[in-house]
Image (cartoon, rainbow, N blue to C red):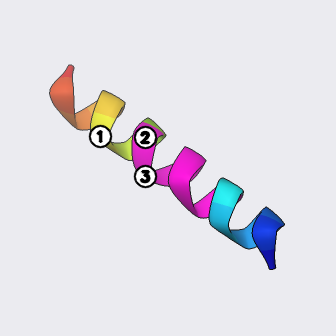
Amino acid sequence: KEKCLVECVLKKIKLVSSRAR
């Protein structure tokens, strides 16, 4: 269950970083 949370956060950060650019 923790892995899902970490991956979810990582995906969100990547999405935000891509949008910020």
For the residue marked with disc 3, what is the amino acid? Lys
Q: Residues within 10 Å of mark 1 (few under 14, many from 20)?
A: few
7 displayed left or right of 20 = right
- Residue under label 2: 13
Quadrant in which residue 15 is drawn: top left
Residues at marks 1 and 2, CA–CA distance in whole angstroms: 5 Å
Left or right: 14, with 8 as reference point: left
| Magenta stretch encompasses residue 2 | no
Looking at the rendered structure, the kind of residue marked 2 is: Ile
Q: Quadrant of residue 20?
A: top left
Q: Nearer the viewer, residue 21 or 4?
A: 4
Q: Residue at x 46, y 38 (%)?
A: 14
Asked if labels 3 and 1 touch by Cβ distance under 8 angstroms, the answer is: yes
- Tag 1 residue: 16
- Distance CA(mark 2)–CA(mark 3): 4 Å
Assess disc 2: are there few (<14), some (14-19) or many (≥20) residues with their C-alpha within 10 Å of its C-alpha. few
Residue 13 found in image quarter: top left
Q: Give the residue at mark 3.
A: 12
Name the element at disc 3: helix
Q: Which residues are magenta?
A: 7-13
Q: Secondary structure at mark 2?
A: helix
